[in-house]
Structure formats: C-alpha cells, structure tokens
C-alpha cells in the first residue's frame, strides 16, 4: 500500500478531536483496515453510511458497518486490508507495504546523529505495545545477544522503542553500556530513517517490524507461537528476513510475560 498518512493517538480525547475535525466535512468513505475495535464507533460517527470495515476479528461491531467485509481463505496481515480496500474501490496492487523515506528526513537524521550514523550499526527494537506485551522477548535474551554480537562485530547497537519500552531498554543499557539507547527519543519518521540506513533490525512482532519490511531493511523477526510468521511476513520473495518461530514452555496456558523465553521451533 503506497501512501502517506498521519498517525492519530488512541486516547478518547484524541478520538474526540478527530471526530470534531470531520464534523462539517464528512469523508465520502471510511475504511477500517484492521482490528483495533475502538476505531469502529469512531468510524460510525464520522460517516455511518460509508463505513467499510474488515470484520473477521470484530464481529460484535458489525452492526456499525454500512458495508462489512468478511475476508476468507487468508489471514495474512497485508492481504486482509488490501481486500477491504479493493472492495471499497481501490486498485488491485501487489500485496506489500511500502514506506518511502524522504531525502530531507534522511539528511536530518544524519545531522542529528552525526557522531555515529555513518558507522555500521544494527537496531534492536526493545518491545511492542502494552496490550500484547506477551510477545516481547525477555530482556536477558537481548542482553545475551548484544554481548555475543558486540564480541564479534564492530557495529554499534541502537535500541529503539516507545516510552512503554523505556524500562526494558534502560535495563538493557545498564547491562550493555556500549549500546546507544534511543528508546522514546525518536519519532516514527526518524525511526524509519534509521531503518533505511541500518545493517539489520532485530525485533519481535511489532509495528516497527512492519516498518522495517516497508523500508526494505534486513530483519531478524522473532514470532510468538500464537502469531504464525506466515501470516505476517512479506509475500514478496525478494524481502530480506529470517523469522524464527518461538514456542512457549507451557502452551496450554494463556499468554504471559514469560512466553517469549521459549525455544525455537
């Protein structure tokens, strides 16, 4: 999907502001592409007659949809929203995510991090959002990999993440003083610029993983056993990644913070 948008926060206040923004100029079409359930009521109030949502995982909100779309025969995270967009009149395009970093954004990141940006480096994404915390890899595993990597390669290790990952990232920094901790210090656009220039991104199943795919950087992506890699990795055979699938030590139990300490399948 090619395009450029603006991220809107998920808080009730942010949603009210977005609703107010469209109060007098309602869009002709409101496409809900994925699974954040709180978006469905917002889309309904923006234009209840023009909501086209993906309903596979949100059946309880289907009554708010003017044109609900049930996608069958695939669970792939890129194909699903494409099917919805095509139903709404979008063109048929190759199933891939594209994020284009502007030249001035790359120039700005080179200026901001001039001390090290031209040296080889790798990016370790320190975690995802709070809601799916059980997909995070244990801090001690990051520490082990960082020590192993630093003993063998001259690349700098850059830690990234949101403010919700700061405690984890600080623990990694204390255990590995040579890392550069940018957790909570970069915007999404700045992170994309860093990924354009990195030699490798190590991440779990996070939004930054998808951003890495979108800017075509090499990835090692660690998947929880409830998140099959085949449903999230690029369909483009030219993509550069490896996707180890981790299994839980106690798969009969609900997801927990210890899950990603499991072994590789």
Image (spheres, helix red, strand yellow):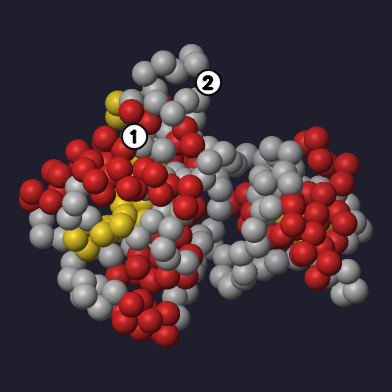
Is the residue under label 1 in contact with that under label 2 (CB below 8 Å)?
no
Residue 34 tag number: none
| Label 1 Cα crowd, 10 Å radius (few <14 / some 14-19 / many 20+) | some
Q: Quadrant of the C terminus?
A: top left
Q: Position of residue 86 (x, y in %)?
A: 70, 60
Residue 138 tag number: 1
Residue 171 falls in image quadrant? top left
| Label 2 Cα crowd, 10 Å radius (few <14 / some 14-19 / many 20+) | few
Q: Is residue 193 above or below residue 60?
A: below
Q: Give the structural element (helix, strand or loop) at label 2.
A: loop
* Residue at the image point whose x is 34% and y is 48% from the top: 169
Residue 230 appears in the picture as rendered: yes
Q: Is residue 262 left or right of residue 79?
A: left
Q: Which residue is mark 2?
A: 254
Tag 1 or tag 2, which sits nearer the N-term? 1
Q: Position of residue 10 (x, y in %)?
A: 67, 53
Q: Is residue 59 left or right of residue 36?
A: right
Nearest the eye: 38 or 92: 38
Count up the numbered dots.
2
Nearest the eye: 251 or 41: 41
Farthest left residue in view: 152
Q: Is residue 172 above or below residue 21?
A: above
């Amino acid at each position: 999907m090619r395009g450029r948008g603006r991220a809107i926060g998920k808080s009730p206040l942010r949603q009210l502001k977005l609703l107010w923004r469209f109060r007098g100029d309602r869009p002709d079409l409101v496409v809900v592409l994925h699974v954040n359930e709180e978006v469905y009521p917002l889309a309904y109030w923006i234009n209840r007659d023009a909501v086209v949502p993906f309903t596979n995982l949100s059946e309880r909100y289907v009554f708010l949809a003017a044109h609900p779309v049930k996608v069958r025969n695939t669970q792939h995270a890129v194909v699903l929203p494409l099917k919805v967009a095509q139903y709404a009149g979008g063109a048929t395009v190759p199933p891939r995510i594209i994020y284009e970093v502007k030249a001035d954004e790359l120039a700005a990141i080179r200026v901001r991090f001039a001390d090290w940006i031209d040296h080889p480096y790798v990016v370790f994404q320190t975690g995802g959002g709070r809601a799916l915390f059980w997909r995070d890899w244990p801090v001690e595993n990051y520490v082990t990999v960082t020590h192993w990597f630093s003993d063998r390669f001259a690349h700098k290790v850059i830690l990234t993440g949101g403010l919700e990952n700061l405690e984890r990232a600080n623990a990694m920094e204390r255990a590995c003083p040579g890392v550069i901790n940018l957790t909570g210090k970069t915007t999404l656009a700045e992170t994309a610029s860093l990924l354009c220039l990195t030699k490798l991104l190590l991440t779990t199943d996070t939004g930054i993983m998808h951003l890495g795919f979108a800017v075509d950087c090499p990835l090692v992506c660690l998947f929880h056993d409830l998140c099959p890699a085949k449903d999230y990795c690029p369909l483009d055979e030219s993509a550069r990644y490896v996707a180890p699938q981790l299994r839980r030590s106690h798969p009969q139990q609900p997801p927990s913070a210890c899950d990603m300490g499991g072994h590789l399948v």
